[in-house]
């Protein structure tokens, strides 16, 4: 058997990574809306708004910047920075869950 790599079918919208960039942008837009709700509702959750905005917007931005990378190393670096920003979102989510639990206990 020849030693050729098998190619899996990829839908056209996945070409050039556009799908993940679109989804990251949509996610950032959803987070902006959520942050508006947090700000309006007050309480300790509103303190997380800056971190949530920074992380979600930075992730989408890094993926856009990776598209224009000057080298493979630059591309990988920008994607890694985006991944770190995603971890920040997870951290903020854990804090929001704790705040929500605390609020529920007081009710």
Image (cartoon, helix red, strand yellow):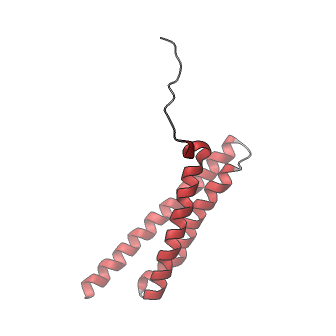
* Residue beneath the point at 59% across and 56% down: 81
Is residue 77 visible in the rendered image? The answer is yes
* 91 lies left or right of 80: left
Give the x, y percent position of residue 87. 48, 60
Give the x, y percent position of residue 68. 71, 50
Find the residue positioned furthest to the top.
1
* 76 lies left or right of 101: right
Q: Quadrant of residue 94?
A: bottom left
Give the x, y percent position of residue 60. 59, 60
Image position of 73 with respect to 95: above or below: above
Find the residue positioned furthest to the right.
70
* Residue beneath the point at 45% across and 82% down: 38
Image position of 7 with respect to 48: above or below: above
Is residue 42 visible in the rendered image? The answer is no
Q: Residue 26 versus residue 94: which sits nearer the camera?
A: 26
Give the x, y percent position of residue 15. 59, 42
* Residue beneath the point at 61% across and 54% down: 63
Quadrant location, the C terminus: bottom left
Q: In which quarter of the image is residue 82?
A: bottom right
* Residue beneath the point at 25% across and 83% down: 105
Q: Residue 96 versus residue 37: which sits nearer the camera?
A: 37
Image position of 100 with respect to 1: above or below: below
């Amino acid at each position: 058997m020849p030693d050729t790599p098998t190619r899996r079918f990829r839908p056209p919208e996945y070409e050039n990574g556009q799908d993940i960039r679109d989804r990251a942008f949509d996610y950032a837009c959803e987070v902006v809306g959520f942050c508006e709700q947090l700000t309006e509702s007050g309480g300790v959750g509103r303190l997380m708004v800056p971190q949530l905005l920074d992380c979600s917007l930075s992730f989408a931005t890094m993926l856009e910047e990776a598209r224009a990378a000057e080298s493979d190393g630059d591309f990988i670096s920008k994607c890694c920075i985006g991944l770190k920003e995603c971890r920040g979102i997870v951290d903020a989510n854990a804090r929001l869950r704790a705040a929500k639990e605390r609020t529920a206990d007081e009710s």
